[in-house]
Image (spheres, rainbow, N blue to C red):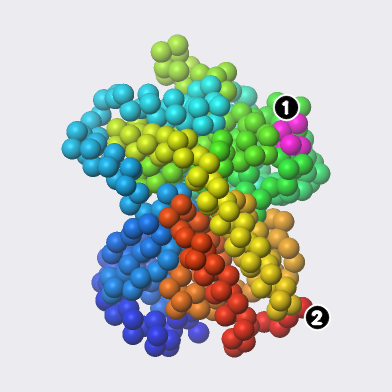
Amino acid sequence: MSLAMGDPSYTSRTPRSRELFERARKVIPGGTSYSNRFFPPYPFYVSRARGSHIWDVDGNEYVDYWMVHWGAVFGHAYPPIVRAAVEQVEEGAHIGWSTEWEVKWAEAVGGWFEAERVKPANSGTEANMYAVRLAQAFTGRKKVAKVEGGWHGGFDRLQKAVSYPYDKPASLGLQRDRATVVIPFNDLDGAAKILKKERPACVLIEPMLGAAGAIPAEPEFLKGLRELCDGEGMLLIFDEVITGPRHPGGLQKLYGVKPDLTTLGKGFGGQYFAGAGGICGRAEVMDLLNHVERPKFWQRSFLGGTFVGNPLSMRVGYTFVRELEARKDVVYGHIDGLGEGVRRGLREVLEDHNFEAYVTGLGSLIGLHFTKEMPRDGRTAARTKDVKLCQRFFLHMLERGIAYLTPTSIHFAISTAHTKEEAEGLVMGLEAFLSGGEGVAPARP
């Protein structure tokens, strides 16, 4: 049965969303702009968002833990970013010429990551696309490596082994690509064996798997990859699109592992706007993009596009980083404190009910896994997942006014706008779900 099919409490609350979905299906394939925003029988459609809350077109209010695909550290409609956006729209949202804001943005991002060079891109996807090309140009090698379960956007070379089962093509239309090497996550010996054989140009990795379940890399795994890349002449690239603003200096600072390049997006474009990507890193590598020192196009690596460095994205992105810097202690004291409290509370509920499930994450990002073992990687998280139980929990939380995506992957992203009481609602939601008993899997033997 579909997730919410036949549930009168959902369908009766959302008649306008149902109407919009029926209209959308006639013009938008699948009825939604992005497949992960759909859940059956139809998704609710959001009319506005502020702080930690969203409202659908039927007037229903939810506490939002999806938070712009985990990008909104400051919550929705954060006043300093809104003011910066409004002022820039009035002055020119996109002009097609260089502006002061791209300089300020690059300086701010470079300071955040302690990077020697910075270059904007249109999105996290584009940042990753250009970063692997840059690595190929620098090393002279053609292969690239990524981990199982790593999501780096819809670029053909990287949209591989994203969702389980990993041997299936991630999309129709992708060509069989033997130049993309897939390595296991949190398995240094297994990764080393493959990398030493294949010797790719780079290893691209999220320091914490995002879409695969908020699964952090083990410190020795990242440190081992750094040493391996140094020894084999490969570049190490961290995709910090999600994690970059979730810790001062990104997770690379937390782990004490410095990549050669870092890719970014989402929050670094001001949380809400396109043109939000970028690359930063070592001057020696980044200077292959330098069109002044390398005036002949065939002697440099390319990065560009109509909306790259547009003043709206640069200004709000600069404002975002400056807000993080100025309020660093308050921001991370709040969101990390709530995140740790939620993880602790969820684990206590599971223990009290002797229920087999696991909690992952770092700082303000949380994963809850209805799996048969602790997921150290995306394969374990997906292979042993009780999908139906995840779907029931999603609907249960939705009925309690708590929204997140996706229905089959339980993730919570906490922002500065969330309150302690709202965060405690996540723990109370799990307690109510397990206490209800209906459809819940058996406890541990």
Residue density around tag 2, few if under 14, some if 14–19, many if 20 or more, within 10 Å: few
Locate residue 395, reporting x and y percent.
48, 77
Query: What percent of the width, then of the height, locates residue 328?
Result: 50, 39
* Viewer-proximal residue among 295 and 252: 252
Residue at left offset 61%, top offset 60%:
341
- Residue type marked 2: Pro
Quadrant hosting residue 376: bottom right
Name the residue tied to disc 2: 445
Q: Is residue 385 left or right of residue 323?
A: right
Residue receiving disc 1:
230
Instruction: Confirm whether the magenta stretch covers residue 224.
Output: yes
Left or right: 390, with 15 as reference point? right
- Give percent across and percent down for residue 182: 67, 46
Instruction: Classify mark 2: helix, strand or loop.
Output: loop
Q: Does residue 98 lie above or below 422 as drawn?
A: above
Q: Residue at x 45, y 11 (%)?
A: 293
Residue 195's quadrant in the figure? top right
- For residue 169, say whether it is visible: no
Question: Which tag, 1 or 2, sits closer to the chain's start?
Answer: 1
